[in-house]
Image: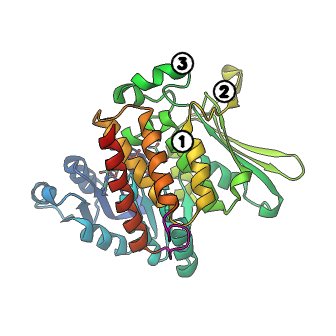
Amino acid sequence: MRRVTIFGATGSIGQSTLDLIARDRESYQVAALTGGRNVVQLAKDAIALGAEVAVTADEAQYKALKTMLAGTPVRAAAGRAALLEAAEWPADWTMSAIVGAAGLAPGLKALEQGGTLALANKESLVTAGALVMGTAQRTGATILPVDSEHSAVFQALVGEDMTAVERVIITASGGAFRDWPIEALTDATPEQAATHPNWDMGQRITIDSASMFNKALELIETREFFGIAPEKIETIVHPESLIHALVGFEDGAMMAHVGAPDMRHAIGYALHWPERRKLPVERLDLTRIGTLNFRPADTERYPALGLAAQVMETGGLAGAAFNAAKERALDAFIARDIGFTQMAEVVGRVIDKMSSREGLQNAEMTLDTVEDVDRAARILAAEEINKI
Ligand code: NAD
Ligand code: MG
């Protein structure tokens, strides 16, 4: 039996992970499940799957969780320290599916234990790529990508020589507003932005898909995970979301990963790797689909892509500043304090201000320095938001 732990179990990726595990209960022992405020779901899943411990990140929810777990063998815990402890609980396979920079510390703790980390939390690589990859190298832990594009690239690279890779193309659906006139974007609401044409995901990543901040994060994620130079990484708009990524080789061949937009594929691939096992995802009928479309990603419509290029050029802790400013701007958009297009304006100003700071490029990358830059960027972003 494999011991598995799921961070962010109550979220979109977490629930899809539990769906796969629940179909094959005899093969897994669930060590820890963690969630945020939705302790009803957390308790229900922890009991159903026989988890050893259930952790809510929100200390205020501890009593409620403990009450719901009373009389069951599942232990209740709460708060940041408990999350980090859950990462130290022995597990062979850990899913990192907390949303945002909050996923970094538990992911790093899990990597310290060795074992396998299935990484959905792209923010870990954006904020602290060198630290995350370096920790895995030092401890012998394995990191497997769960983001659909990165799982696709990973699969296209099996058995290939990295030096023969000419370019990597990750696709983007274009999000909720891909066909809107650019002028209309200023009035886009959080509800409109949170509706994805193809994928069913958490609210924050869905809005990030509409703004392409999600793709911006993914460009940096590609660079950090595969160690590919930024100029070899491209993004194109592919409205059907059936080709997730392509790898172009020196001999002109391109390997494309094609599949239904269902995260259980990438999660299942990471769960069973290096094997392939039967997964409950749709089998595509290409004759029914008929046509696949592609178009360039317009940097005027999607300024986040230009910001990603700037961040990769700066390097160092710029990713931590970028992600934190983006998270703060997204909070402000959801709260209706700023408009849709103002998110990129806020992030751009924070990046400009911080890039010139002594030490952003050359500072040592540790969890502390990353968290310091994260805090500083959120403060600067709040100042920019207040000016609007
Ligand atoms: P979600 O919002 O549906 O779920 C997030 C999970 O994190 C929940 O369990 C929530 O309780 C927990 N959480 C939130 N804030 C927390 C905090 N401060 N501390 C601890 N736990 C916290 O998000 P999601 O869509 O499942 O995305 C999770 C991660 O996977 C993100 O990094 C996202 O970019 C990535 N991802 C998601 C998808 C997708 O299809 N949903 C695809 C690719 C990558
Ligand atoms: Mg993705």
Tell me: residue 356, above or below residue 309: below
Q: Quadrant of residue 62?
A: bottom left
Q: Amino acid at mark 3?
A: Pro
2 or 3: tag closer to the N-terminus: 3
Q: Amino acid at mark 1?
A: Ala
The residue stretch that appears in magenta: 357-365
- In the image: residue 110, left or right of residue 157: left
Q: Residue furthest right?
A: 251
Tell me: residue 134, above or below residue 271: below
In the rendering, which numbered label is found on residue 371? none
Tell me: residue 358, above or below residue 212: below
Q: How many marks?
A: 3
Q: Residues within 10 Å of mark 2 (few under 14, many from 20)?
A: few
Q: Is residue 104 magenta?
A: no
Identify the residue position indicated by label 1 in the image.
Answer: 304
3 or 1: tag closer to the N-terminus: 3
Mark 2–mark 3 Cα distance, whole angstroms, equals 32 Å
Q: Could you tell me which residue is drawn at 55 percent across and 38 percent down? A: 303
Identify the residue position indicated by label 2 in the image.
Answer: 285
